[in-house]
Every structure is written in structure tokens, then in C-alpha cells.
Image (cartoon, helix red, strand yellow):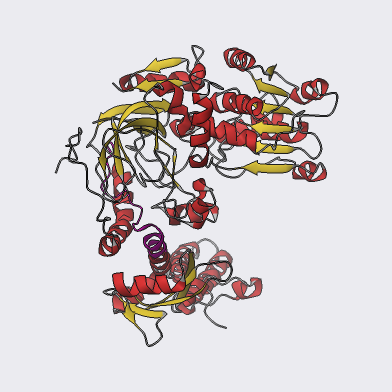
Amino acid sequence: MKALCWHGRNEVGVETVPDPRLLNPRDVILRVTSTAICGSDLHLYGARVPTLMRGDILGHEFMGEVVDVGRGVHNLKNGDRVVVPFNIACGDCSFCKRGMFSLCDNSNPNAQLSAAATGHACSGLFGYTHMCGGYAGGQAEFVRVPYGDIGPMKVPDGLDDEKVLFLSDIFPTGYMAAENCNIQPEDTIAVWGAGPVGQFAARSAFLLGAARVIVIDNVPERLELARKAGAETICDDGDVYERLLEMTDGQGPDACIDAVGMEAHGHSIDAWMDQAKAALRVQPDQAHALRQAIRACRKGGTVSVPGVYIGFIDKVNFGMAFNKGLTFKMGQTHTHRYMRPLLERIERGEIDPSEIISHRLTLDEAPNGYRMFQEKREGCTKIVMHMH
Amino acid sequence: MKQNVSNTERVASLAAGALGLWWSKRAAGRSMGLAGLGMAAAAGLLARGATGRCGVYAKLGVDTAASRRRAREPQVRSVRVGKPLAEVAAFLRDRLGDRFARDTDPNVFHGRDDLASWTVRLTEASSGSGTRIALTAAPGGSARARWTALAHAATPLVDAAETELRNLKALIETGEIATTLGQAHGGRSTIGQAVLERADLAREHADAVGAQARLEPRPSWTPPATTPAYGGIPQ
């Protein structure tokens, strides 16, 4: 089969590799019909996340048709059309049973490596480094899905791939980020980053009853997309704090969502220092957006972090957060628990996830797609690859 | 004073001391004072290497030999499994009987391999429901295993104990052990391939344990008769 493999920093290529096969009783194999490039794939592309290796197959947003079923899977059969959550969860451990699927205890074959880095092992993820399990990803013609009886969700035939593909990651991720804000009817929510997760966070905040959503970014096309969803926007060309306070009568947003994560850029000394350290490979995480969110958030507000961070961050004013009594909510999305209710919202027409797609490519064009997405060229907000 | 310098450091001290002696001998032609200082430093390093004791470390409270001493002691690790104690005990007895021999206590099991002697002790979890599995691994078995444990400061033993516990937990809770062994990938670099082959040893072990205890399919379920549309991995 053809698969998109990581070849080194800022370099990916399509290779012919062996087809996947069932390795465990609860595995299923999918013929991938659609897959997408996620903003967090760019962290891998730029070699910012450790334990990625040359030859690893990338991709964690994908859907397809079941073509082989392990003998331990009883709820799927060949021909079923499914969308797959990006995190791999067993469904049986204490974390899965509490709905915290991204913290699954049993799905990471390299748990020791992960625990050494973070104290406790994270769950397995598709196509996202060996620390997160080393699983082959879904930017390929076929993919093996472990615990196929727990993750994949059947989708109705009437809905196009493009309507449901983002249930695999970015829609639930944006939604959980908004849910973590405990939104009340009159709340104003600020969202840093108008990339795909930021777009869904803004839309989800409205779905959950926010009165106002303010989106901060510096890419005009992305801000325009946020405005289409009803959000107000700030072009981050300097003093975001002043602008946010001005827009909220000096109060500050009730909750702030950092949908940027470790690759934040900015026009201040802290951002330049972060960029220098990242360039020197001293510290990959650039926390400029998080610093702004902590400073701007109103007293007693919530800072919700769906953006990915990998390791140490510095110059984060924890005293500021303490004295303002902020609540922090963060982590990988518990995708499994959001897929069904969000599918129902799509079916009811409350949201059309496909409206954020800017480019449709083939798998062979994916290397160019990565470059374009990284450089934010040609109005690129979201790339989907249709396989057939 | 007890040994407080690790063996690696002792070898380095001996090498540096020998180098110091050679340099001092050469320096003697130019300055006897410098040569004397060099000789004194070299002698100190040689003594440090030969005895494994360091006065400066003792004053600072540093002990780089501690991990080696600990390697001679049994390693204990534990994990919580979300199943009742009786069910976990039955699983170990019925499915992994070849690997773990029973004790007079029904909640204690013993095993032995090249690396270590293992004792598995089951108790109620410290809070909530579930079972605590405590694994004690004593370096033993062959002389080679004891040497391996000492040379690597018990790391292989700890790794093996933690892997064993994770595997047990996964098997009991999910019926299988997560694996990527044998999955597809693109071309690797030489170093990457070597690193992964080393890591695969642990996965092969997990696969072997998993195969032994794998749950049987439910009789009511029949695999689909249609041939998969994909070609499968080339053999």
C-alpha cells in the first residue's frame, strides 16, 4: 500500500510499504477513504516532538471502510463505514470506564518510555511518535485500528466523509476545549489561534451558549472564517491584552482557550526568546499564547488548553494565575465520548464541519500539502486527502 | 569509609591517574614543582580508582555507587488492576500456570527465569475496588543475570518487572497486550532500525505472554466470510 512517511525535519514522502494485518484479537483493518493533516502533525513535521523516527507513518485523522475484523470484535463487520478517534483506548481500564479515554492505561506499547518522560504513560495515539505507542498512522491506503470494538464509530451513509471526518479529532478537541470553560449564558470566550481547532472551539463555544466569542490570530483568511461563524476577531499585531480588556469593559474574557500550543509566534521579547530556544533545540515549547491568555483572563476565569505542549515552558507567570484565582483545564481530548453527541449535532444541521476545509488533495500530493499548511500559504486552513 | 565511587568512575580515575603520571614524568624536565603537583594529583586519582572511595564525595554527601548497591537488592513494583482479587488469582492460576507456580497462599505465585526470581503477591487495592499486584524481582537465576543486574544498576530488572506488570494488567483487563510488533513502516535509518530492534525484544516477550493467555472468541460470533479487499503483508 501507499503511505505517507516521515523522512526527517520538514520532509515527508509517499512510500510503498506492506499492508497492515491483524496483530491482536480486538484489531480491525480499515481501507482509508479520507484522511486529514492536523495542526499537530506540523509539530511532527518540524521535528519538534521527540521519539519520531524516519519511516514512521503519520496521520491520526482518518475514516474508512472495515476490511478485516479480529476475532475479539463483535460490533463491526466488513463493509462498515467508520470514523476513528485519534487516541487509542481499551475501554476496560479505570480511566476509560470514567470516560477519560485519552488517559487509557493499556493502549500504549511503549508505556515505559512515556512514563519516564511524563511520570505516567499517555494512551496510544495513531501516527504520533514512539512515546505515544509508535502506532502506524492513517495517512495511508490501509490502517490497523487496535481495540476496534471501542474506538471506531459507524457513520450513516447519507453523510459525506467531509461532514464526519473531523469527528476523529479537531471537532471533539475544539468542543472539549469549550466544554472545559464551563460556559454560562452571558460569557465571553477568547480563543487564541484560528486554525482548525480554534475554529471548532469558537463554534463549539456558541453551541454551548456563549454570548460572545473573540478569536485572536494573525492570518487574515482564518480570521475571516471565524467571523463567518459569528466571532469577533483581533489581529495579533501587538497588544492583545489591551484590546481584549477594551472589548470586555475592562473585565477580561470569562474564559480563554489556547488553541495554539507549542508553536506560538508573537511580537514580544518572550516570543522571540522562545523562538531562539526552539531554533537552538534547547526547548521546543513556545508558550506566548498561553502567557497572553493567563494575563487577559478575568479574575476567577478559566484557561482551557487544547493546544499541544510537549515539555518545559518558562516565563509563565504562575503568581499571576494564582492571584487571579484562575482554573486550568487541559489535556488530550477524550474523543470517544464526544463522537456520538457531535455526530447528532451534525445530523441536526447545527454545524457543518466541512466549511473549514480549504484544500482537497490526493495522498501523492500530501508532501506539498504539509509544506503549504506549515507556511500557511494559499489561504490554507485545513487539508483533506481523499484516497479513492 | 564505604565505597562511594561508581565502577565507571573508578576506571576513569585510573585512566586519568595514569595519564597524570605520564605527563608529570615529561614535565619533570622543565619544572620539578609542576611535576610534583602533577604526581600528587595522579596519585590521588589512582588511589580513588583503586579503592572506590573519595573523600570529597564523602564531604559532599555524593554516592555514585549507591545504584550498584541497590542492584543487589530485590526490586519491588506494583500496579492496580480493576478486577476483584479472586478473579485475578484465578487468571494467574488458570491462564499463566506455566509461568507462575502456586504457593501455599492462594494469592502468592512464584516464577523464575534467566533474569530473576519473581514473586507475585495479590492483595485488595489500597483504595476503591480492584486488586494490587506486587511483583518482587530478585536478581538471580544465572551468574550472567546477576552480573547484568549489577552492571546496569538493576535497570534491566526494573524494566522487566514494570513490563511484566503492565502486561499482566492489560491481559486481565482487556484480554490482550497492546503491540505494534510486525506493523508496516517506511524505510528506517540504520540507527533507528537498531534502536527499534532492541525495543522489539520487550514486545516479543509481551507477544509471547499474550499468546499464552489470549482470550478465546465468543462461540456466538462467526468471522465474516468475505475475503478482505487488501492484500495482507508480504511473507
> Image quadrant for the N terminus of chain A?
top left
Instruction: Work out whether residue A204 can be spotted.
Output: yes
Magenta residues (range): B166-187
B13 vs A242: above or below: below
The reply to whether the magenta stretch includes residue B182 is: yes
Q: Could you tell me residue B140's position as x and y percent?
A: 34, 79
Number of numbered discs visible in the structure rendering: 0
> Image quadrant for the C terminus of chain A?
top left
Q: Is residue A313 left or right of residue A53?
A: right
B229 vs B111: above or below: above
Q: Quadrant of residue A199?
A: top right
Q: Is residue A267 left or right of residue A157?
A: right
| Along the line of sight, the residue nearer the viewer: B94 or A370 | B94
| Along the line of sight, the residue nearer the viewer: A116 or A126 | A126
A152 vs A364: above or below: below
Q: Residue furthest front?
A: B220
Q: Residue furthest right?
A: A250
At a point 26% along the width and 53% down the height, the residue shown is: B220
Q: Could you tell me residue B3's position as x and y percent?
A: 52, 79
The reply to whether the magenta stretch includes residue B200 is: no
Q: Could you tell me residue B228's position as x and y percent?
A: 20, 36
